[in-house]
């Protein structure tokens, strides 16, 4: 009995000392395994919370830089408008503009956190290129079969970069088309031509691109003896994609499915019934041209497209604006500055939405960690009140057992003394 009491006291003392009912696998293998796994997951969640904090700091830094750029651009626009007045000293205004330019450059250079600067990127051109996206670790997930995965919040840097190496940033002119950037191959259509009967293969979509309000792509084609053209502009893109989730009326064409919808809009939906000759059909991975039923047996011929812009091919760079230039085109400059400002505002809104999402994920992560702690506690924590009471009871039982053993031993000695 004393040995049994000593063993029970050892286990109860361990519970009181550690606060755990199940400390070792031998105490309860099933619960110990679950609790150990949950502790590991909780550690991973803690690392995720740290990563979210780092991501939030990066977003905050970029947001402050974008907000400051918005204010500076507004002042820049006001100066350019003032320079259009007759009799004003444009040299003095240009001096102010130069200071504002340097301020914008300073903002873009200094908006850096942990070695990353989202406002000044090494990206060149399109969003599909390597380095155009980054991500913030946002969650740690364990599925029912035990496999684990890490969730992320993706950040599209192509929407944020004020300046890019090679051009194409929010405040820069488009890169030289000879470098392969800008509109690039216009989703595979640039340089494309074809002819044939039935379903004629269309352009193969190769990379995302943007049709701005300054771009006009005109394609001449014929079906049999009938000749026509279709035109792709930002308005056509907005018509085709404006009703789908995630499209921000920004002229972005990001997939083969998007491109097929734009071609269908231009070749079929925007045509009056007598003028409809064919339509673009299909989606990922193929697009093809199909003649309307009355012309189904006729030869389809598509000529190479012609791309024109309402701005100079190289566009306008904010750092190149000079109001003292006698050949300056003020209406175009004002239009471009407004376009830049709207892009900066959109970028600020994008960062604001990221900021809100990270904050919500942080709050959820904290609640989830607390929930895991409580779950682990229910599995393995000892009832301290019960364990303390039991320990005291066992101590009393031990003392009684010791006294009983002592009495028994003394009685035996008394009996043995009679035989001496």
Image (tube, helix red, strand yellow):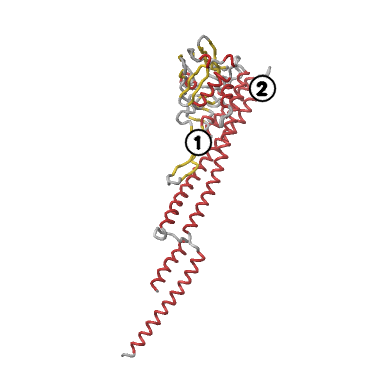
Taking depth in this image into account, of 284 and 191 the one nearest to the observer is: 284
The mark found on residue 260 in the picture is none
Residue 72: quarter of image: top right
- Quadrant (top left/top right/bottom left/bottom right) for the C terminus: bottom left
Q: Which residue is mark 2?
A: 82
Residue 76: quarter of image: top right
Name the spot of residue 195 as percent of width and height, x first. 46, 14
Q: Which residue is mark 1?
A: 154
Residue 418: quarter of image: bottom left
Query: Residue at the location (46% across, 31% down)?
Result: 131
Query: What separation in Å lies between label 1 and label 2 (alpha carbons)?
Result: 41 Å
Badge 1 marks a residue whose secondary structure is: strand
**Left or right, residue 95 beside residue 287:** right
Q: Is residue 177 above or below residue 110?
A: above
**Left or right, residue 136 beside residue 419:** right
- Quadrant (top left/top right/bottom left/bottom right) for the N terminus: bottom left
Q: Is residue 31 above or below residue 259?
A: below
């Amino acid at each position: 009995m004393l040995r049994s009491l000593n063993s029970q006291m050892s286990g109860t003392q361990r519970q009181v000392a550690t606060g755990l009912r199940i400390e070792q696998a031998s105490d309860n293998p099933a619960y110990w395994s679950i609790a150990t796994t949950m502790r590991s997951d909780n550690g991973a969640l803690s690392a995720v919370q740290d990563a979210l904090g780092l991501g939030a700091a990066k977003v905050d830094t970029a947001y402050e830089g974008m907000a400051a750029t918005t204010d500076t651009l507004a002042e820049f626009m006001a100066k350019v408008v003032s320079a259009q007045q007759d009799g004003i000293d444009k040299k003095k205004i240009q001096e102010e503009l130069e200071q504002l330019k340097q301020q914008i450059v300073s903002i873009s250079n200094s908006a850096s956190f942990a070695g990353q600067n989202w406002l000044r990127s090494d990206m060149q051109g399109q969003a599909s290129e390597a380095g155009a996206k980054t991500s913030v670790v946002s969650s740690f997930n364990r599925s029912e079969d035990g496999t684990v995965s890490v969730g992320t919040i993706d950040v599209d840097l192509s929407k944020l970069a004020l300046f890019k190496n090679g051009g194409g940033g929010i405040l820069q002119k488009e890169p030289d088309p000879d470098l392969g950037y800008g509109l690039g191959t216009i989703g595979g259509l640039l340089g494309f031509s074809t002819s044939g009967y039935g379903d004629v293969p269309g352009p193969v979509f190769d990379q995302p691109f943007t049709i701005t309000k300054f771009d006009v792509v005109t394609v001449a084609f014929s079906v049999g003896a009938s000749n026509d053209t279709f035109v792709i502009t930002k308005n056509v893109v907005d018509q085709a994609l404006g009703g789908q989730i995630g499209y921000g009326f920004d002229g972005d064409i990001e997939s083969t499915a998007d491109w097929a919808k734009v071609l269908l809009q231009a070749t079929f939906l925007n045509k009056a019934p007598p003028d409809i000759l064919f339509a673009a059909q299909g989606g990922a991975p193929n697009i093809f041209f199909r003649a309307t039923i009355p012309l189904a047996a006729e030869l389809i011929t598509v000529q190479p497209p012609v791309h024109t812009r309402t701005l100079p091919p190289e566009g306008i760079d904010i750092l190149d604006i000079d109001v003292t230039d006698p050949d300056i085109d003020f209406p175009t400059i004002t239009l471009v500055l407004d376009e830049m400002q709207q892009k900066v505002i959109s970028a600020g809104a994008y960062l604001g939405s990221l900021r809100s999402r990270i904050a919500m994920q942080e709050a959820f992560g904290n609640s989830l960690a607390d929930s895991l702690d409580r779950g682990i506690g229910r599995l393995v924590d000892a009832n301290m009140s019960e364990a303390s009471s039991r320990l005291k009871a066992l101590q009393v039982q031990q003392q009684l057992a010791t006294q009983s053993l002592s009495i028994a031993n003394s009685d035996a000695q008394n009996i043995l003394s009679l035989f001496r």
